[in-house]
Amino acid sequence: MTPTTAAQATALFTDLTGRTPDGVWSAPGRVNLIGEHTDYNDGFVLPFAIPHRTYAAVGVRDDGLGRVCVASTFADEPVEVALDELDELFPTPTGTAPRVPEWAAYPLGVAWALRLAGAEGRGLDIAITSDVPVGAGLSSSAAIEGATASALNDLWAAGLDRTALARIGRRAENEAVGAPTGIMDQMASMLGEPDAAIFLDCRSLDAVLVPVGIAEAGLAILVMDTRVTHAHSTGGYRERRAACERGAAIMGVPSLRDVSVGDLPRAEELMDDVTFRRVRHVVTENQRVLDTVRVLREDGARAIGDLLVASHASMRDDFEISVPELDTAVEAALAAGAIGARMTGGGFGGAAIALIEQDSVQQVTDAVNAAFAASGFTAPVVFTVTPSAGAHRDS
């Protein structure tokens, strides 16, 4: 996988406009170490930023027309609208297609959300390049939002902090794109630091950096992208979220954050089987996040394997968001000696991760490739990641 660079974004901007940008900003994708579908339930998550990034080369326009033009290497044609038109284009009702191409709804949605938050500025040209895999559950969308929000925050002198920019990104994703996601991805992309995961309370947005010590322990994190693409704006995600809201209502609490593992026997008595299993996943996953943070601090990364495996089983059996390719990746990695493995991201496709010995990367990669071939699946894309820096200005 060839890394994308700020220079490539600058070149695309120059091809688009004939001038140099005012700057280049970037933001990373993320891997969620543990804590899936807990974010929109006001729960706990433990993601980290990855080296793969999205770059936005941005320049203020001097034509006085108040228009914004976005271009990307993953689209044939740029999209241009008037800033004053953004209120007509958005919001997008959940589950419906935006009135602009979906890729463009992310950066345009950020501009719309910033304006709603009181930011004002002149028209812009935005050129976007990325090496964050799309549809792999590594949050390519939050990377676009983070890079764009960082750029516009500077160029429009909005003065917002990183948490506020994460909120802007979530609003763009929820209300401009129409995807009912939580705020984990945007917070991870904005707040990431090298060799640390972000222990995030999605209710208060309190975030604490937790050293993971992966390399120090002689370990590596392997991403196994199944190449089964998913989309958060489609039905399965909405149905899971609705089930969680239904479960919270049955329990008489604001969100499933307020349900403990000890409450599950009563929940089982009150709910139908499907709703209960959805609730059980979220409640036990919250506990697994807390346990993982404690184990990392007390015993180190080598001790979290069983928690990763239990998380995958819960997503497969209770939340039912895995697919055969994800299960195959996890099972093959464990059989080849992985300390732990689980799917990561929203599910219905995307990627799995495995915590492995540094010197077994090729061995586990070969085992996963062989298992996919034996099952007749499309070959996965397998690579290692390390916890990395969050959004920043590059030039």
Image (cartoon, rainbow, N blue to C red):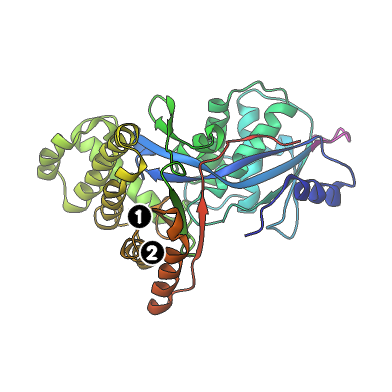
Amino acid under label 1? Ala
Residue 257, image x and y in percent? Answer: 28, 32
Foreground of the two, 81 or 339: 339
In the rendered view of the protein, which quadrant contains the C terminus? top right
157 or 33, nearer to the observer: 33
Query: Contact (CB < 8 A) between labels 2 and 1?
Result: yes
What residue is drawn where x is 19% and y is 47%?
276
- Residue 44, given in percent of the width and then of the height, sits at 35, 34
Q: Is residue 241 above or below residue 165?
A: below
Q: Which residue is mark 1?
A: 341
Question: What secondary structure is marked by label 1?
Answer: strand
The residue where tag 2 is placed is 329
3D distance between C-alphas at marks 2 and 1: 9 Å
Q: Which residues are magenta?
A: 59-66
Q: Earlier in the sequence, mark 2 or mark 1?
A: 2
The kind of secondary structure the magenta stretch mainly shows is loop
Image coordinates of residue 281 in percent, x first then y, are 26, 46
Q: Quadrant of residue 234?
A: bottom left
Q: Is residue 28 magenta?
A: no
Instruction: Give the side of residue 292 with respect to residue 199, left or right.
Output: left
